Amino acid sequence: MRDPSVSRYSAGRLSPIRRAADLRRLRDEQFDVLVVGGGATGAGAALDAASRGLKVALVEARDLAAGTSSRSSKLIHGGLRYLEQLELHLVHEALTERGLLATRLAPHLVRPVPILVPLPSAGLPQRAWQRGYYGLGVAAYDAFAGIFGTGRGMPLHRHLTRDGARHLFPSLRADRIAGAIRYYDGQVDDARLVVNLARTAASLGAAVVTSARVTGFVREARQVVGVKVRDLEAPGSEEFEVRAHTVVAATGVWSDDMSQMLNDVGVRPGLRVRASKGVHLVVPRSAITGESGLILRTATSVLFVLPWGGHWIIGTTDTDWQLDRAHPAASARDIRYLLDQVNAVLDRPLTTDDIEGVYAGLRPLLSGEADSTSKLSREHAVVEPMLGLLLVAGGKYTTYRVMAADVIDRAVRRLGGPARPSRTAELPLLGADGYAAAWRDRHDTARRHGVTAGVVEHLLERYGTLTVHLLAMMSAQPELAAPLAGAPEYLAAEVAYAALAEGALHLDDVLTRRTRISIETSHRGTESAAHAAEIMGQALGWDATVRQKEIEHYLARVTAERQSQTKPDDETADAARMGAPDVRGLAADRREPLLEIDL
């Protein structure tokens, strides 16, 4: 639990000093719950457990949201296609979570985004059927979210004529549509939400340590009582044990690795997770003329075209992946597929020259009988393959809180004692408290601090009411008020704040996740690396040698990614991407090729 004499903000700072203190806690204390994995579900589980008054620790091998949770479509949504598949409980659950995030838990990070469902051009009878079919689906979507009330957090849908659709989205080809339906979903910076989850957990007393790799379980008889951890920021140090009554593995596409650590005692995992690769393109806002997003049906799935500040995000693919899980690679084939799909409805086709950024992520899907990953379930599961160890896997980003509550419910039952129900549906994340008033008063705030209203709006939409701390940093060090080199939409203060309060340990953490410079600039962050490294170096005490190594690593990573995106298939793209090693020196994340057996 947090010391009541310490403010919630101070208790939630993931600073270098805090990391050192939390490392000592890992070595010296026994925890009620130890969470392995720093994605949305893991950070959500740590927050859920800490909010119930439990003694909690979270360890993550890389950075917060370094895997799947920073590489999504940036949507908090119910999933229109799940309605079509009659997975009604999933839609209702997800839309309930969307409303909570947009109105109570994280209104500074989740906001409405309009999306058009284009109705294909056809004869009158077919047009009438399509409008009725899709209209019924979107109406049901609104109904599941709750037709009325502030809790839904999104406007209702609206039918549009062809002219109305092209007024909102002039780049749509007139000959391909007969009209559209506009609905709303939530948009989020997925990585920033995870950072806020982890910081909110830390503010309630959780120990949060990144660059801490779990190498094995600590067992007594047939019960897991902790894990073995190696601090990757101190490569010469010995691994150490962290003791806990319950270990929660929220490791996504690495879930099978957790089960394999128990192979020597013949434990069956209870679930299997299959990785599905999703690739997204980022293009400048000027490449497409529109004030709304699009959702397009493809042969295998759906495709989103979403406004993202001064950019568009186009995605995603949905293909099986069995290669490097830490850095899934987008191939030229993936990129061509996305361009072909979106160009079918645009009046000016996009080319590879329009692409600013590309990113690929892996969805952890519960493995089943389906051959296609697009048909596998988005439901989640909680299993206990061995006493003291809980695995949670599957699901989707939007329902991270539900998954976290489910697994911590199981942990609480194991611990015994009084019932402690989940509180996270009522617990705003750091930066959410007072957000509506802060937004209303943004012009006054700008005048008081001598900055433009645009600067305050930018900070509020990324940090919420924590904006006051960045403004204070800029007042104390005016050089931090300057734009970042190569990425003028970001401020130098944001880099310093990432290192001093948000747990960023490496240049890649800042350029890829605390900001999105790596995908939002045509240079992929290479022109920002030196300036950002200088700022981080001042905050973290890097000497010239460390700064140069950080820059060299980042440049090598960008080069490897660019090369992989020119390769024709997954295998060659993966080989090219592996040309740049992970900054944390991990080499144990590649799946071994499956043996081919003739039956």
Image: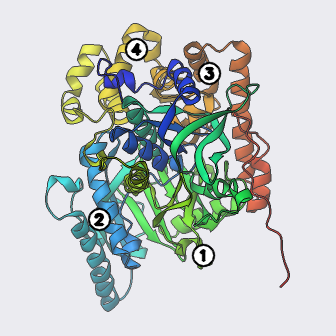
Check disc 3 and report its element: helix, strand or loop.
helix
Q: Quick check: 290 left or right of 252?
A: left
Q: Are marks 3 and 1 in contact (CB under 8 Å)?
A: no
Q: Earlier in the sequence, mark 4 or mark 1?
A: 1
Q: Which amino acid does label 2 sit on?
A: Arg
According to the picture, the residue beneath numbered tag 1 turns out to be: 372
- Specify the quadrant that holds the N terminus: top left
Tag 4: amino acid: Met
**Residue 182: image tag:** 2
Which comes before the other along the chain, label 3 or label 1?
Answer: 1
Q: Nearer the viewer, mark 1 or mark 2?
A: 1
Three-letter code for the amino acid on which mark 1 is drawn: Ser
Q: Distance between the residues labelled 1 and 2?
A: 30 Å
Residue 305's quadrant in the figure? Answer: bottom left
**Res 473 label:** 4
What residue occupies the far right of the structure in this picture? 598
Badge 4: few (under 14), some or many (20 or more) residues near its Cα, within 10 Å?
Answer: some
Using a 10 Å C-alpha cutoff, classify the residue at mark 2 as few (fewer than 14 neighbours), some (14 to 19) or many (20 or more): many
Query: Which quadrant holds residue 130?
Result: bottom left
Q: Is residue 286 visible?
A: no
Q: Which amino acid does label 3 sit on?
A: Ala
Is 456 placed above or below 365 here? above
Residue 254 x %, y %: 63, 54
* Gap between marks 3 and 4 measured at Cα: 18 Å
Identify which residue is drawn at 49% across, 26% down.
498
